[in-house]
Image (spheres, helix red, strand yellow):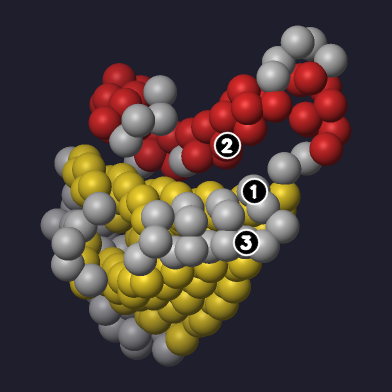
Amino acid sequence: MIRYINNPKSNSLTLTSKKHETAGVLLNLVSDSAERDMEIHMKPAEDSRLFVVILAQLHGNSTYTIRSFQHHSSKQSTSDLLCKSLVRDTSFFRFEGTITIDKTGAHSHAYQKNDNLILSSEGRVVSEPKLEIEAHEVFCTHGSTTGYLSEDEQYYLSTRGVSQQQVEKLITMGFLRSGIQKLLEAGITLAEVESLYGRAGLV
């Protein structure tokens, strides 16, 4: 099962998977001047896999906070979250990710990664991961990266006749589209993933 969610009006989403199911969600968030908090609750069922890719694009003077909660209360459950943010102008992005595995969640796997690309000198990012593990024999990983447009990449493309505007577009599109691989890992077909990214305006 695959879902596409574009700029939800609600400030809280609960994403689930059924027993023995592999489910994927692509969440597209775009903000130009608002201040907004969003909570994402992931609750995989027993012996299921739940993949979520969040694409956040901030413009203007927007402030966006995403708080994700990967809650494992069932055994042999898998959650995999990839959050990618693109920060322009004077925007501020905060990511707070919590992985919780209850005592009943033995043999569960939880993955979390937050990648951020800042496209201005005044953009800001804060990323805070958190683990709350009560079960034994589990596997958890989390990580975060924040970077700016690579001068080497810009120079390389400019020497091949690519304009500055096109350079930024190519690099940012590549940055956001790298989330495709995560959904492919979920067993979702390339055609389905390309269709979702097309709906998000990223192909």
Cα–Cα span, label 3 and label 1: 7 Å
Label 3 with label 1: CB-CB less than 8 Å: yes
Q: Quadrant of residue 78?
A: bottom left
Measuring from the top left, give residue 186's x and y in whole percent: 35, 41
Q: Residues within 10 Å of mark 3 (few under 14, many from 20)?
A: many
Of residues 15 and 74, the one drawn nearer to the viewer in this rendering: 15
Q: What residue sits right under mark 3 in the picture?
A: 123
Which callout, 2 or 3, points at the residue further toward the start of the chain?
3
Q: Residue at x 17, y 62 (%)?
A: 9
Which residue reaches farthest top? 161
Which callout, 2 or 1, points at the residue further toward the start of the chain?
1
Of residues 138 and 169, the one drawn nearer to the viewer in this rendering: 169
Q: Residue at x 78, y 30 (%)?
A: 153
Q: Label 2 is placed on what type of residue?
A: Thr
Label ID, residue 172: 2
- In terms of secondary structure, where does tag 1 sit? loop
Q: Label 3 is placed on what type of residue?
A: Gly
- In terms of secondary structure, where does tag 2 sit? helix
Q: What residue sits right under mark 1 in the picture?
A: 119
